[in-house]
Structures are given as structure tokens and as C-alpha cells.
Amino acid sequence: MTVFDDAIPAVANLDPGLLKALRQAATAAADDGVEFYVNSGWRSPEYQEELLREAVFRYGSDEEAARWVATATTSPHVSGDAVDIGKSDATEWLSEHGAEYGLCQIYENEPWHYELRADAIDRRCPRMYADPTQDPRMQQ
């Protein structure tokens, strides 16, 4: 799916500011021959918990899973404030141009995960966290 697929809840339920910034960036990226695909956007709390259970099984502990998947109460995907962009050319484009639209990579270990940081337009993106376990929002 792309950032223009309004019929898909993963796109339609994104925060309106984030969606607007994504669409503006995607339009500019298309001029460079790059298309944004949404691997994951908004998620229901139930789906987020399923992803967390799968991560615990895959990584063998709650602590290791937390480096990759947040709980339903802390995940910015559940609130519609995060999007995972697919294809490396799109994430490369965003790493170079995303701040111009307020779109910032938040975690060093997740080059696909972007959130809106409107002040980045003037100040650049904030320093990334190594992984979600370093993000104070995940400590709730």
C-alpha cells in the first residue's frame, strides 16, 4: 500500500499531520523516481499485542523483544503517530530529505520507522535513540 491508499485503515487512521507530511514527501520523492510503500502504519491494540507476543517468541525474552516491538499502550503505531516505510530507496530518500517535511527516523535500529517532528523542518531531526528501549515514551 502507498501513503495515498485512504481505504486502508493502516493509512487512513494515521495522525492527519503525519499523513499530510508523508504525502507531501511522497509527491516530492516521486519526482526523483522513488515511491513510498507503507509496510505498517496505524495498528489496532490487539494487533500490536500480537506482534509483541511474536517478538518475545522470536527473540526469547521480553527485554530483547522490547528492542523491536512496543506494547499496545506505548506504541506510536497504535496512536497513529508512526509509519514504517518499505523499500530501501524510500528510506534512503527520507534519511536525506525527511526533515524538510518534519519526518524523522527515531531509532537507529529501525531505518524504516518514521514519526512526525514538525520542529525538524527548522531545526533538523533530533538525535536518534539506539532502539525503543532508550525512548522515554516506552518506559510507561
Image (spheres, rainbow, N blue to C red):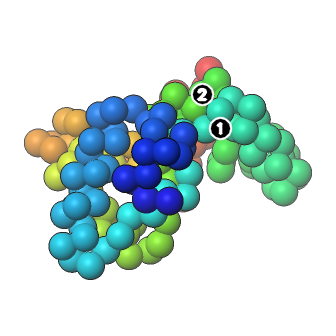
Foreground of the two, 103 or 15 = 15
Return the x and y of residue 132 as percentages of the image width and height.
57, 43
Residue at the far front in the pictured view: 7
In percent of the image, x 70 and y 38: which residue is there? 48
* Residue 47 appears left or right of 39: right
- Which residue is label 2 attached to? 74
Foreground of the two, 52 or 2 = 2
Indicate the secondary structure of the residue bearing disc 2: loop
CA neighbours of label 1 inside 10 A, class few (<14), some (14 to 19), many (20+): many
Indicate the secondary structure of the residue bearing disc 1: loop
In percent of the image, x 53 and y 46: which residue is there? 8
- Amino acid residing under circle 1: Ala
* Residue 45 appears left or right of 23: right
Q: Taking 12 as reference, is 24 above or below it? A: below
Name the quarter where the C terminus is drawn: top right
- Which residue is label 1 attached to? 70
CA neighbours of label 2 inside 10 A, class few (<14), some (14 to 19), many (20+): some
Foreground of the two, 32 or 137 = 32
In percent of the image, x 65 and y 38: which residue is there? 70
